[in-house]
Image (cartoon, rainbow, N blue to C red):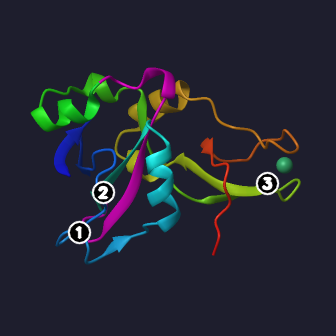
Amino acid sequence: MKLIQIEGFQVFYFYANEPFIFPKPLNQNLRPFEPFMEKELKNHFNLRLVITKSFLGSNIYYVLYLYFDPDKFPSSLDKKVQDDTFTNEDFQDSVFSKFPKTVCIYCKWKRPTLCIEHDCYYRNFELELKKMRKFEFKLCPNCGKSLRQSVLMIFKSQIIN
Ligand SMILES: [Zn+2]
């Protein structure tokens, strides 16, 4: 894990396959970490766990998932982060995302998904627009209608509680 700046955001970046150990102060008010994602992060080379401090200045830390366009994933990203040789360009095809369960309001289909975390970009509308234009959002795979949020990826497995 390493504290770095990505396109103006300060985040704790977790390397691929790094165990999720959250030292103080991250562990004190951390939310929301989904055990489901612990497994899924290992299955997807284009995702990284990042933790950011609340945008509102409180001492709450949020778990986010940095989603990269799988076709544009930068080579040796973890190594570049480790060596401090990365630039914002390495992150231009990534976007901060969150993990909700998405339900189709038309046909009630539901699955775990990753969606753009719009709250991250509230101070940088231009960057948000740029990200919105870069990614294609998923439609409901069951009925083909809009899922009414910026769904970046749909997980194949369901959450087993
Ligand atoms: Zn549907």
| Magenta highlight range | 55-75
Q: State the image coordinates of residue 22 (x, y, percent, origin top left).
A: 25, 67
* Relative depth, front residue between 148 and 1: 1
Q: CA distance from mark 1 to mark 3?
A: 34 Å
First of labels 2, 3 by sequence position: 2
Q: Is residue 20 magenta?
A: no
Q: Residues within 10 Å of mark 3 (few under 14, many from 20)?
A: some
Mark 3 C-beta closer than 8 Å to ligand 1? yes
The residue beneath circle 1 is 26
Q: State which quarter of the image contains the C terminus.
A: bottom right
| Mark 2 vs 1: CB contact within 8 A | yes
Q: For mark 3, what is the residue?
A: 104
The quarter of the displayed image where residue 63 is located: bottom left
Above or below 9: residue 22 = below
Pinpoint residue 152: horizontal percent, then vertical percent.
58, 40
Instruction: Tell me the kind of residue under disc 3.
Output: Cys
Q: Is residue 71 left or right of residue 13?
A: right
User: Going from the N terminus, do you reach mark 1 or mark 3 first?
Assistant: 1
From mark 2 to mark 3, how far is it between C-alphas? 28 Å
Q: Amino acid at mark 2?
A: Ile
Judging depth in this view, the residue of 8 and 115 nearest the camera is: 115
Residue under pointer 2 = 51
- Give the x, y percent position of residue 141: 80, 41
The residue furthest left is 83
Q: Going 44% across and 48% down the picture, which residue do you hit?
A: 42
56 in relation to 142, above or below: below
At 13% from the left and 26% from the top, the residue drawn is 85
Instruction: Count residues near mark 1 (Cα–Cα under 10 Å), then give few for <14, some for 14-19, many for 20+.
Output: some
Q: What secondary structure is found at the residue carrying circle 1?
A: loop
